Image (spheres, rainbow, N blue to C red):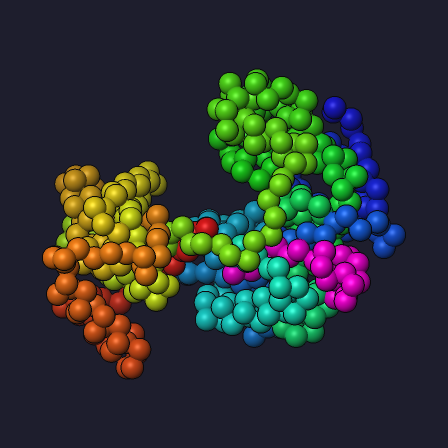
Amino acid sequence: MRSTRRRCRGCRLSWPGGERASMSKNDGSGRQVSATSVDDTTATILHIDMDAFFASVELLEHPELRGTPVIVGGTAGRGVVTSATYEARRFGVRSAMPMSQALRLCPKATVLPSHYERYSHFSRRVMDIFRDMTPLVEPLSIDEAFLDVAGARRLFGSPATIAETIRARVLSDTGLTCSVGAASAKFVAKMASTRAKPDGLLVVPAEATLDFLHPLPVGALWGVGRTTQEALERRGLRLIGDLAATPPEVLSKVLGDAAGAKLHALAWGIDARRVSTHRPEKSMGHENTFGADVTDPERVRRELLGQADRVAVRLRKAGYTARTVSLKLRYADFTTITRSRTLGEPTDLARRIYEEVRDIYDGVRRPSDRIRLVGVRAEHLVDASGNQLSLWDPDEDWREAERAVDAASMRFGRGVVKPASLMSRPKPVGTDEVDTGPRR
């Protein structure tokens, strides 16, 4: 199983067994692309991922920085990295890393602020290009999507041809590059796009799936996090091929029945999921990293109120209510806790969300706490149109008030009306405020 070298037919490069760094670092050092002669007839699922998307969008405004290390994110106080160019990633810079650490790793990098409205604009343009080729598009996030191109072959050619057409259109229409993995299974296509970065195409025909998978580290499998990877490696299971050769019942003892069976199937290239154009939102939330540790509980409560208001507005705009609300706290020593509470009735009201997370916070608060980050999340979302209000609605007054605020915001702009306790809220200085949803 642990052959020292394998080759995927149609792939220009061979890869050594156990080449862990190239799959996990995501800095382009292990890049592979397909030969033009590859048989792509069975590789009808594409995974398309924009290359260093946020950083690449910023470089459209700063072309003089191309080819240099660039980091996007907050610079003041406890700013974090939002994105980085491949030149910066090769120094070890990663998203979600504290900016101070990133600059120690790459002191010559140029730091640019984030502009989320630009990213949303280019995301819409890119997704429109995808949908021009096939209606079967499943967005995974703002910068990646699965496409099923089986039905598009008669109009646009083979899967590889379609992929190259999309890549060319994205570049010509937006100035951005993307990488594409093509395979017969979704998770293999996603792994192939990672391998093709940056600006590449890697096709994995169905018959070459195991040759592609088995030499790769177990950490490359979708769903294998650091803890699972360490548990597998402690038992000598370092490659996906090792996982495939291990009986499912043995894996179940290590990982549990469900996870053991799932990973064993993936190790054999089995993934029955199809591309779905409808992906219901599971949760949405906001979190904020303070510029300095916060010890005042009233400031934490004000932050919770502001985040609850934002989450509620997004719920109402999306037509959802939440069955569960959760609070996230990160302390000065980076210890992080998450506590959730299931509601008696689903809600989309800021007041109800705030009351619940405030109660959770008050229940875990200690006088010695130094809070670094706080977050509010609405979970287990359901379609608001299906909710039946009771004859006596205790939230009726608040419901009318918040809907009035929504109407005022649509007419005059967001923030024109807000809770009185937030009117004197200082503008965050040296903080990173993050929209952490929706999660799917």
Query: From this viewpoint, which residue is outermost toward the right?
Result: 37
Q: Can residue 414 be seen in this view?
A: yes
User: Which residue appears at 71% of the width and 47% of the height?
Assistant: 183
What x and y, as percent, mark residue 349? 23, 60
Find out whether residue 150 is within the magenta segment: yes
Locate the N terminus by quadrant: top right
* 12 displayed left or right of 306: right
Above or below, 387 relative to 427: above
Front residue (pair 333, 107): 333
* 59 displayed left or right of 30: left
Find out whether residue 176 is within the magenta segment: no
Front residue (pair 413, 291): 413
Front residue (pair 244, 199): 244
Magenta stretch?
Answer: 142-165
Above or below, 366 relative to 53: above
User: Which residue appears at 43% of the width and 51% of the height?
Assistant: 439
Marks counted in the figure total: 0
What x and y, as percent, mark residue 110? 53, 63
Q: Can residue 292 be seen in this view?
A: no
Res 23 → quadrant? top right
User: Which residue appears at 48% of the width and 24% of the height?
Assistant: 256
What x and y, as percent, mark residue 427? 26, 67
What x and y, as percent, mark residue 12? 83, 47
User: Which residue appears at 72% of the width and 32% of the height?
Assistant: 215
Above or below, 239 relative to 125: above
